[in-house]
Each structure stands twice: as structure tokens, then as C-alpha cells.
Amino acid sequence: MCGIVGAIASRNVVPILLEGLKRLEYRGYDSAGLVIGNGQSLERVRSTGRVADLVEKSAQTQGQIGIAHTRWATHGVPSERNAHPHMSRDQIAIVHNGIIENYEELRASLTAAGYEFSSDTDTEVIAHLVHSHYARGNTLLAATQATLTELVGAYAIGVIAADNPDQLICARRGSPLLLGIGENEHFIASDMSALLPVTRRVIYLEEGDVAELSRKGCRIFDETGTETQRPVQLSELSNESVELGQYRHYMQKEIHEQPQALANTLESVCNSQSLIPGIFGADAHSIFAQVESILILACGTSNHAGQVARYWIEEIAGIPCNVEIASEYRYRTSVANPKTLVVTISQSGETADTLAALNHAKNIGHEFSLAICNVPESAIIRQSKLRLLTRAGPEIGVASTKAFTTQLAALFLLTLVLAKQRGKLAPELESQYLHELRHLPVAVQKVLALEPLIADMARHFADKHHALFLGRGLHFPIAMEGALKLKEISYIHAEAYPAGELKHGPLALVDKDMPVISVAPNDALLEKLKSNLQEVRARGGELYVFADANTHIREGDGVHIMHMPEHAGYLSPILHTIPLQLLAYYVALQKGTDVDKPRNLAKSVTVE
Ligand code: F6R
């Protein structure tokens, strides 16, 4: 989604801004731009291509203050005129993430006041509003503060003025923004990775904060306008974690990082002999003791993790569990039970739909919230009573991989802790599961060794336009995840079905051009699944089966088998995810798509 970088320094900030934008490319964007101040005027450069085009176009641009942006279109098509920064009368420049909901009425009143609009965006109203207050003699800070009182919606903004080369103003509400602290230079960014080349010292702005940055320092004002202090933290993000290294794509790198990401996520429990609720926060024990049911809210891949967890939670902990797509839940009239634990799952912790669903749940009377998230400083973490961080490290590829498997590991921990607190986890079972969790990184590593075979299998998909994914029980959500991965990065239309549902309709689609991919763990539903696979073969469907050892599914005409290791019990969905990620990756390579930045998609979906 959109990205912001800004800088005020005693050196030329253009290279800093451009490097920052490059580091934000992974979030997805369709245009980019920057504005640089030179003391008298503002110079704007924008491009509808990649940041690399912007680099070329701004080769001659220099200045010691500037703001820059990558835009993912919401209001108005991707075009240069809609690209940020937006300006008002060449005096004020602004970059904005988020959505201004009342922009139409603001636009009408600003037009009546004589302002001319040169874009179709909601953002441009902010530039003109700041200008209108600034022109009345307010300071840039006061003009921005006055503007914010008129906005309804979500924003992270950066603002500069042509005649004020010594101040950069920024603010956030509903969209993330942080300040980078350097030596006599200061920065803003929507994501820490943008600032790693210049500083690790960071201040995370709170909801409603406004900040005034100069070269010498920064002042922060809370939502009441009172000057306040926010802690300076040292970011733990390392340069290697956001660099590609030996890999061809971030997605491939992140698939291979899964053993380490799982080991990091499980670190707190793997070194101990027993599980304690405290890993979810100080109040976890007392909250879990009151919980009667679970409601999981998430989007996309994170929702699939929740769907796997439903099987675990009901079967192992014996607690009723519902999983809802966050964007649907937020608009549904539902009945709240204050004894329900609301679990949000999110890689980014900034997904607008998931955040809104969490707030909706609280508003209708849910008191207990728990976040499973990969970003410690994110809004979802801050707004939840309990939390468990997945420690997958930054995920740059738009298609979620290591975030998903670490979410599953975290949800399995949640299941075990809940089961234990309810007296449903005998000590020997607890030790067994802990042992299996400790073994997980090694088990994943073994599955990763299938990569060359899967690359080979992917060649069969080069000319395909559709695919069906089948799974049963605990592995049906894994089939859904496999289908989502394939469609989002290879653009092959893919659908997932619980295998038993095939004969109720989708079997009509099966012919030689419809590859059918099946997850075949050696579990209680194996024999049922085998019958379903026969139904496909009998209709001439080509089968690609990811089969555990001892499933006795034989390779043959139209049946391709990928041999997985031993059945991993409850943790099997984690292992079965890996080959589907690799399959999607290698099919996308066959198709020649932009693997890390698939068309139309963004990494953090911070708008509705
Ligand atoms: C798919 C994918 C998305 C995200 C979804 C939620 O590969 O990455 O479906 O899972 O947009 O994002 P988070 O987890 O950040 O809330």
C-alpha cells in the first residue's frame, strides 16, 4: 500500500528519499513522487512507473528538505496527476496514506473558496486546507493542526511549505507513521525499513499525534494539542532481513526462512518444559479462565491460519470457535458474548478491515482481545489486551509465506495453553506436543529439500488457466491457502474445495485441462480423500498429490505424486503449506509474472 518517506537535513535529502521509497516498494504501488524544498520554492517530480523511473527523473533535483511517496490508487486512477505529493498553489506540499472520508464536501467548499483541483484524489483537499490556514498567518504546525480537525478518516501525512525550509510537519491517525532520529537530521516514514540506511533510532507516533521536525530536533503534540514525549527506541530490524541476498525473489527467500522464523517464534516455549499463559501477556491466565468461546477475525492468508486453528481449538481445547472474514464481520449484526475471546491475526497489524473488525467487536461488547501479529509496534498489537508476536522478521514479498506458518505455530501454542488451563492437556501430551514443536524447524527444512522436484512439477502448469485444490478437515484451509498463493502470483484462476464437496458441483469442471492439486496427509480422512481422488481420475482429471509417507497413493498415468515426510499429526498443515508455496512460486516463474509485486495487490492493506 502507499508509503511515506520524508527528511530534513543539512545534506541533500534526495538520495535518502529515493532509497527509502525503494525499500517501500514491496508494499505495492502504482506511482511515486517527491517534492524537495530549496528555501524559496518546491520542486516536484512524479512518475507512474517504478521508483527506478523516479530516480532517473530526479537526477538533477537537490535540496535539504523533502517528502516522498509511493501511491496505491484508491481515489482516482493510477496516473501522474494523481500521484503524490499533492500541492496547493505551489506553496504547500503533502504526502498522505489513508482515506479522507469527507473529501467530497471539503472539495466543494474549497472549490467555492477559489481553490483549483488538479487531481481526483481525496488527498488534495488536505494540501488546500493547510494552505488556507497557512495563508491566514498560522505557523505550518498550527495550519496542519487546524486542518486535521476538519478531516474525517484515516491518515498519516507529511507536510512542507515553500517558504519554510526549516520545518517538516507530520501527523497520524489510523495509518502508521514513525520518526527517525539522526545527528542534526530527522526523518519520517510509514515503515522502519525505509530509514535503515540513515538511522535505527525511532519514535513511533501514537494515534492523533502531530510532530514538528527541524534539523536540530522534534516536538510531538498529542491529540489534545499538548506537547508530549514519546520514547526513542532502537529498531531491531537488520539490513540483511530486508535484503535479497542469494535469492532470486523475496518470496523464495521468505519460504526458505521458515525454519528460522518458526524457531524464533517458538523460542520462548521451546526452551521450557511446560506451557504458561503468560506468553500471551500478564492478564492471560485470568482472561483465559473466563473465556467460553473464541472468535477469530482476519483477512486473506491470516484468515486461513484462523480456519486451521478452529479445528485445533475445538478438538484439543474443547472450546467453541468461529472464524470470520474481518471485512464481513465489521458490517454484520452479530450477538456479542462478553466471555468470547476475540483473536485477530495479522502479519502487518495494520490491515484496515481487521482493525475495524476488532474495534467493532469491542464496541458491541467484547472485552477480551488477543492479537497474533508480526509487527510489535502495530496498531493491532497496541489495541489488544493480549498478544503473541510471530517472529518471522520483515515479510517483503506481497504473498504471505513465513508469516502464515508462524501464525499457525502461534495458534497451536494458543490451543495448547487453553487446553492446559481447562485440564484437557495431560502432562505427557504436553511434552509430546512441545517435542513436536521443537522438531518443527527441522521438519520444515526437510520439506524444503523438495524444491527441485516441485520446480520440475511446475512446468506442467505453464499453459494452464485454471486449477482446483482439494483438502479435507484440518487441511482444507491449506488447500485454500495453496489456491490463494497460486492465483495471486501466477494469475492462474484457482479454487479450493473440501474434497468431499467435489461431487456436489465442481466435478463438472474436471477434464484434462483442469489440474487438480490435493493435499494428502496420512490422517483419519485419508481413505475418504482417496475415493474423492478416484472420482477426479475417472473424469480424466490430472492429479498432483502431496502425499505423506505410507499413504499408498500410487504414481501412474495422470497421477503425479510428491512424497512428503512422515505424517506430522496436528502440525501437518504447517508442513503441507511449504510445497504449495513452492509450487505457486515456480509456476509464477514459468508464467513470468512479477512474483514479489503481483499486479493490483499491496502488502499492507491499510484502506478498506
Ligand atoms: C496473501 C496475503 C493477504 C494477507 C491479507 C491480510 O498472500 O498476504 O491475503 O494475508 O491482506 O494481511 P495481514 O495479515 O497483514 O492482516
Image (tube, rainbow, N blue to C red):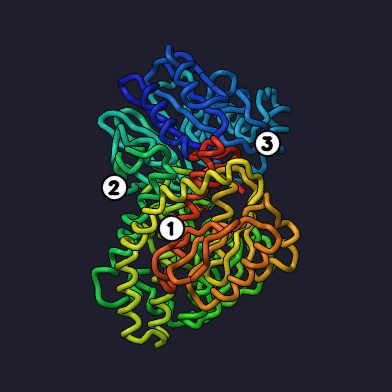
Q: Residue at x 33, y 80 (%)?
A: 430
Helix, strand or loop for disc 2 = loop
Determine the CA span between mark 3 and mark 1: 36 Å
Whether 183 is drawn above or below 319: the answer is: above
Residue 168 position, x and y percent, is 42, 30
In the depicted structure, whether residue 325 falls above or below residue 99: below
| Callout 2 amino acid | Glu
Identify which residue is drawn at 66% across, 57% down.
541
| Residue at image coords 59%, 19% | 89
- For residue 482, the mark is none
Label number found at residue 106: 3
Residue 88 is situated, as x and y percent measured from the top left of the image, at: 59, 23
Query: Tag 1, which secondary structure?
Result: strand
> What residue is drawn where x is 60% and y is 63%?
470
Specify whether residue 150 is in view: no
Q: Which residue is mark 2?
A: 236
Q: Percent position (x, y) of residue 190?
A: 44, 40
Q: Is mark 1 within 8 Å of ligand 1?
A: no
